[in-house]
Amino acid sequence: MREPLKGARIAVKTCMGVKKGEKVLVVTDPLKIEIARSLVEAAREIGARTLLMCTPVGKRHGEEPPDVVGEAMRAADVVLAPTTYSISHTQARLRATKSGVRIATMPMITSDMMRRGAMLADYREVKKLSKRVVVRLARAREVEVTTRAGTDLMFSKVGRRVYDDTGIYHRPGDFGNLPAGEVAVAPVEGTAEGRVVVDGSMVDMVRGRIEIFIERGIAKKISGRPARGLLRMLREAGPKSRNLAEFGIGTNPKARLIGNVLEDEKVLGTCHIALGDNSTFGGKTRAGIHVDGIFTMPTVKIDGKILMKDGRLRI
């Protein structure tokens, strides 16, 4: 078996539950074409009616795909999107989801990630763990996050739904990443205060310490040697890009810290934040960009009670 095809079969059969005769659309770009072809092959093995669309490489995560892609997404039963830049937090993806399409986005996926690590997890177990975290986090009003590296952040989640990305997308309108394994919420705009020290990855496989100082839900100051690319992306996207868009908790025991945000944010024992758009999962900010940053060994308190201590969940 060719290496990427192993993960492709898990994605198609286990995660998406593709059935014979279903319409499967694979959206990709030239840098991810080989992975896309493995997904097409896996879908055709099942007997799905499969179409591959290859678009130009985008400019940033959260950028809208071409209109023709958005229309094709809405016409499919299942969409798989191995792309260089994420289309997860786009209006095109949201419209397709609302139309009942099952979607898995795979931004920055690599052949290595298709054959080992998070992609090969037992996703039924990932789902069980994620649901347990959702139950605890959903009850909370305020969240406090600290790390030994210096993160000290507080925010409100009053009225915000908690989402789980389980890797099992069998119902109409299901959506998530592959590889999967996280629980996330959009903090209430204007409520976040403090500092986040990203000591994992952020911005397209860049690793290193980035400090983000947040006031009233906005990243007012960003520093650190690896932050140059991040600052450029935020400037290009506009002022709303500095919104604290997301807080997430990794729930995939097979995920590895490899310097790739797609897998790093799923690592059990890590947390992450994102800047930019949260309009696709319960927030109010449309920014045209969504950039995640991972930090390690977090302690998470919800309404003063410990949910996670130094990277270990207490559920």
Image (tube, rainbow, N blue to C red):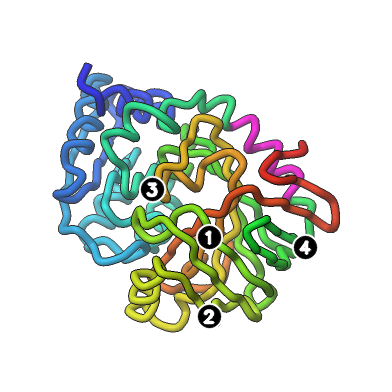
Q: Which residues are magenta?
A: 127-137
Residue 147 lies left or right of residue 165; in this view the side is right
**Label 2 residue SS:** strand
Question: If you read the primary sequence from the N terminus, does the residue marked by circle 4 or circle 2 appear first?
Answer: 4
Q: CA distance from mark 4 to mark 2?
A: 23 Å
Q: CA distance from mark 2 to mark 1?
A: 13 Å
Residue 255 to residue 288: above or below: above
* Mark toward the viewer: 3 or 1: 1
Residue lying at 54% horizontally and 69% vertically, measured from the top left: 211
For disc 1, the marked residue is 198
Residue 135 covered by magenta stretch: yes
The part of the image, by quadrant, that contains residue 80 is top left
For disc 3, the marked residue is 260
At which x and y percent is residue 108? 31, 48
For disc 2, the marked residue is 221
Q: Amino acid at mark 1?
A: Val
* Mark toward the viewer: 4 or 3: 3
> What is the magenta segment's predominant secondary structure?
helix
Does the CB distance between marks 4 and 3 fall below 8 Å?
Answer: no
Q: Amino acid at mark 3?
A: Asn
Does the CB distance between marks 4 and 2 fall below 8 Å?
Answer: no
At which x and y percent is residue 228? 36, 73
Residue 277 lies left or right of residue 59; in this view the side is right
| Nearer to the camera, 169 or 106 | 106
Q: CA distance from mark 3 to mark 2?
A: 24 Å
The numbered dot on residue 142 is 4
Q: CA distance from mark 1 to mark 4?
A: 21 Å
Question: If you read the primary sequence from the N terminus, does the residue marked by circle 3 or circle 1 appear first?
Answer: 1
